[in-house]
Amino acid sequence: MTIVIHHNPDCGTSRNVLEIIRAAGEEPVVIPYLDTGWTRPQLQALFAAAGLTPRTALRETKSPAADLGLLGEGVAEDTILDAMLAHPVLVNRPIVCSPRGVRLCRPSETVLDLLDRMPPGPLSKEDGTLVLDAEGNRVG
């Protein structure tokens, strides 16, 4: 199974998702999108596959979204998309692609739906929050 994660190593959720994928026995293709940037067709395809729009994929906090005037209701989707191309950090993360689908994996346990097999339990996030119990069952 090929899994691709658009990853920001400074993001705890992104790091948690990467570790869940690896705990399931997969080594994903890791795309450091802050370094590589995005293309318009790439974002349009990812958003379409994940059922997102530029507005729903916009990272509103810890990003320049407010400073760029992108948070108002009247801001056009194309304007947001153009800003995402210029400022890759505006795209919420992580976005994960697998043969089972494409998702914005927030919260991080959302990635479990994209895996062919569950990682063994118990499994916790960086902050200690339990994701899978000792029997491998989802918690919460």
Image: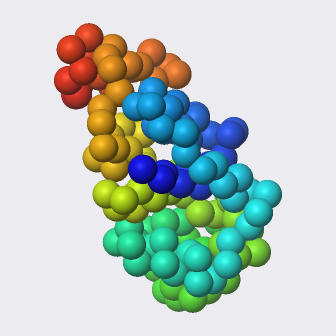
Answer left or right for 135 relative to 55: left
Q: Is residue 67 above or below residue 21?
A: below
Q: How is the image coloured?
A: rainbow
Q: Nearer the viewer, residue 54 or 50?
A: 50
Counting the numbered discs, the total is 0
Task: Return the residue found at the far right.
Answer: 35
Q: Nearer the viewer, residue 89 or 7?
A: 7
Answer left or right for 2 relative to 10: left
Residue located at (31% from left, 17% from top) = 121
Choose top left, top right, bottom left or bottom right for residue 51: bottom left
Q: Is residue 93 visible?
A: no
Q: Position of residue 16 (x, y in %)?
A: 51, 32
Q: Is residue 5 above or below residue 112?
A: below
Q: Is residue 1 visible?
A: yes
Task: Return the residue found at the far top.
Answer: 134
Q: Position of residue 74 (x, y in %)?
A: 49, 86
Q: Nearer the viewer, residue 21 or 51?
A: 21
Residue located at (30% from left, 32% from top) = 118
Quarter of the picture containing the C terminus is top left
Answer left or right for 119 relative to 12: left
Choose top left, top right, bottom left or bottom right for residue 135: top left
Answer left or right for 110 relative to 35: left
Residue located at (43% from left, 68% from top) = 56
Q: Position of residue 33 (x, y in %)?
A: 69, 58
Q: Position of residue 13 (x, y in %)?
A: 52, 38
Q: Is residue 54 above or below residue 137?
A: below
Residue located at (40% from left, 31% from top) = 24
Choose top left, top right, bottom left or bottom right for residue 15: top right
